[in-house]
Amino acid sequence: MAEERGADDGGDHLTLTGLRATAFHGVFEHERREGQVFIIDLTVWLDLSAAASGDDLGSTIHYGELAEEVVGAVERDPVDLIETVAQRIADLVLAHDSANSVRVTVHKPNAPITVPFSDVAVTITRSRA
């Protein structure tokens, strides 16, 4: 069996980039009322050797289903902070038995900032306890 590795050590990983969800997170009333687009990037570290050698979808995380789960998690239950949204996603990913660790970035490109900017994002990395 392949050695288990995690975030930042070059181990096997699955990456989803640019998932889009419309949600109502934010501390301001207009954010809760009007909603906005959030963009999610995530990398999941897991052992892909069994999936690769057996050509078996059941030995990995189905990235199509994971994408739907992540978007669903972002779109439900508005909260104030994108940090909370990122943690929600990390918890969801780590609920998959094969996931060892995850890095989640939540972008809020339309954040209520009064100066010109391109993006606001938070990134968290979480591993199994």
Image: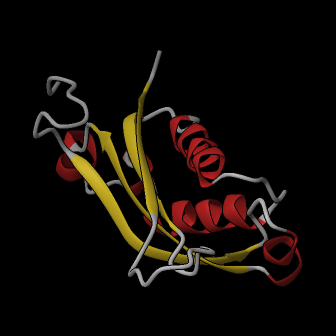
**Which residue is the extreme one toward the left?**
10
Above or below: residue 102 compared with residue 21:
above
Please tell me which residue lies in front, 108 or 12: 108
- Residue 104 position in % (x across, y down): 43, 51
Q: Quadrant of the N terminus?
A: top left
Please tell me which residue lies in front, 1 or 9: 9
Give left or right: position of 49 versus 91: left
Please tell me which residue lies in front, 119 or 67: 119
- Residue 64 position in % (x across, y down): 50, 70
Residue at image coords 56%, 78%: 114
Above or below: residue 99 compared with residue 85:
above
Give left or right: position of 38 versus 29: left
Give left or right: position of 39 versus 99: right
Number of numbered discs: 0
Residue at image coords 88%, 70%: 29
Please tell me which residue lies in front, 31 or 12: 31
Residue at image coords 26%, 57%: 55
Give left or right: position of 47 versus 89: left
Residue at image coords 47%, 15%: 129
Question: Can you tell which quarter of the image residue 110 is in?
Answer: bottom right
Question: Can you tell which quarter of the image residue 38 is in?
Answer: bottom right
